[in-house]
Amino acid sequence: MPSTSTMIPHINETSFQAEVGQLVKDIVGAIRSRNPLNTLIDSWHDPIYIKSADGQMLVANKAYEHTFAGDVSSVGRFSSDYLNETIKPVSASSDALIMQGCTSVDFEHLGRDQHGRMLLLRTIKRSLLGSGHTRAAILGVTRIVEVQTENPGALRLLDLARVWEQFVRLDDREKKVAVLVAKGESVKDMAKILDVSDKTIENRRNSGMRKLGVENQAGLIRLMVRFQDNGFHDFGL
């Protein structure tokens, strides 16, 4: 049975960027006037949040809490503590770009929300450094482009290039384990090849699968074969 997807109306890039640009001006104005920030963002249907330089959540609207934080408020927590593994790498790397001097970062990415849905997301991050707030460093606005309703074969319908981006961000051991899994090696054989324990192999395999958004080893094997068949890399499968 094929997967289905819910398409959100096409995003007008100029309009979305303009909306976020105006929001930044409003937030900076509120910061300098010492007015509450939640009143500016709670009316938005898009998830919106403000982080400190070290990644701690300072402010988040209801849409963000519902989509990404779950039952426990994100405020006061670090996003790395609750975001799904499919979102953590791109969240950290885009935060780093802002902290390294970029004033704006705009990108699309795949990731799971707190409800287990695989989403195609459009995120714009803006620097709040110099806004007058003692801690606010990053404003993020994320728009849901597409919601995928998955079944075991749903990965066939995902944008393979975007999943490849997640694979590239895996650490070296996770990549090596993924390749060996695709080649049909057993856990014990992989442990011997990489000179690590069976438990380490299992941990790196499971970590890699979470980050790639696949639910089991069979799904990982299918994904690796698709990467090779579509010319992303020759793994020797």
Image (spheres, rainbow, N blue to C red):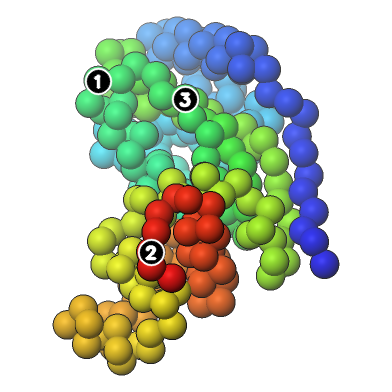
How many numbered circles does the render carry?
3
N-terminal label among 2 and 1: 1
Q: Can you identify the residue that label 1 sits on? A: 101
- Res. 106 mark: 3
Instruction: State whether residue 30 is above or below residue 140.
Output: above
Q: Can you identify the residue that label 2 sits on? A: 235
Mark 3 crowd level (few <14, some 14–19, many ≥20, 10 Å Cα): some
Residue under the point 22% across and 82% down: 193
Q: Is any part of residue 216 visible from this angle?
A: no
User: What amino acid is found at the position of numbered circle 2 in the picture?
Assistant: Phe
Q: Nearer the viewer, mark 3 or mark 1?
A: 3
The spot of residue 52 in percent (x, y) is: 32, 33
Gap in angstroms between the C-alphas marked 2 and 1: 37 Å
User: What amino acid is found at the position of numbered circle 3 in the picture?
Assistant: Asp
**Do tag 3 and tag 2 residues touch (Cβ < 8 Å)?**
no
Q: Secondary structure at mark 3?
A: strand
Q: Secondary structure at mark 1?
A: loop
Residue under the point 35% across and 50% down: 169
Residue under the point 67% across and 17% down: 12
The spot of residue 176 in percent (x, y) is: 30, 68
